[in-house]
Image (tube, rainbow, N blue to C red):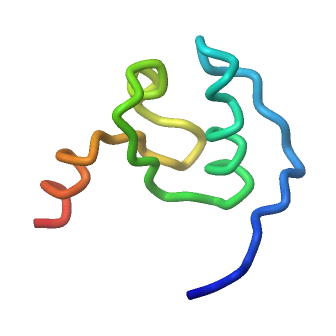
């Protein structure tokens, strides 16, 4: 397991719930391809930069 940390260089203020912006910052700065969540505020966004926002069930279906 890696102990690498994601350095937050680019800040985000885009979610309708500002408390969830920290998760978007991780996805953006960590260059995520997928963002898996059950959070409705985040799921309404569908995509964020290059990250596709999916429910856990949709993520599993995508790779099944």
- Image spot of residue 11 (x, y percent): 84, 36
- Image spot of residue 40 (x, y percent): 38, 21
The residue most toward the top is 16
User: Toward which corner of the image does residue 58 lie, by quadrant?
Assistant: top left
Would residue 52 be found to the left or right of residue 30 on screen? left
Pick whichever, 35 or 47, lies toward us. 35
User: Toward which corner of the image does residue 31 lie, by quadrant?
Assistant: bottom right
| Residue beneath the point at 76% across and 63% down | 6
| Residue beneath the point at 76% across and 22% down | 13
| Residue beneath the point at 10% across and 66% down | 64
- Image spot of residue 14 (x, y percent): 68, 21
Would residue 54 be found to the left or right of residue 60 on screen? right
Pick whichever, 50 or 19, lies toward us. 19
Tally the numbered discs. Answer: 0
Would residue 8 be found to the left or right of residue 19 on screen? right
- Give the position of the N terminus as an image quadrant: bottom right
| Residue beneath the point at 26% across and 47% down | 56
The residue most toward the right is 9
The residue most toward the bottom is 1
């Amino acid at each position: 397991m890696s102990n690498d940390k994601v350095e937050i260089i680019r800040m985000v203020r885009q979610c309708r719930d500002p408390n969830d912006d920290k998760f978007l910052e991780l996805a953006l700065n960590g260059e995520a391809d997928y963002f898996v969540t059950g959070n409705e505020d985040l799921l309404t966004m569908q995509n964020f930069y290059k990250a596709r926002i999916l429910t856990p069930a949709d993520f599993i279906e995508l790779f099944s």
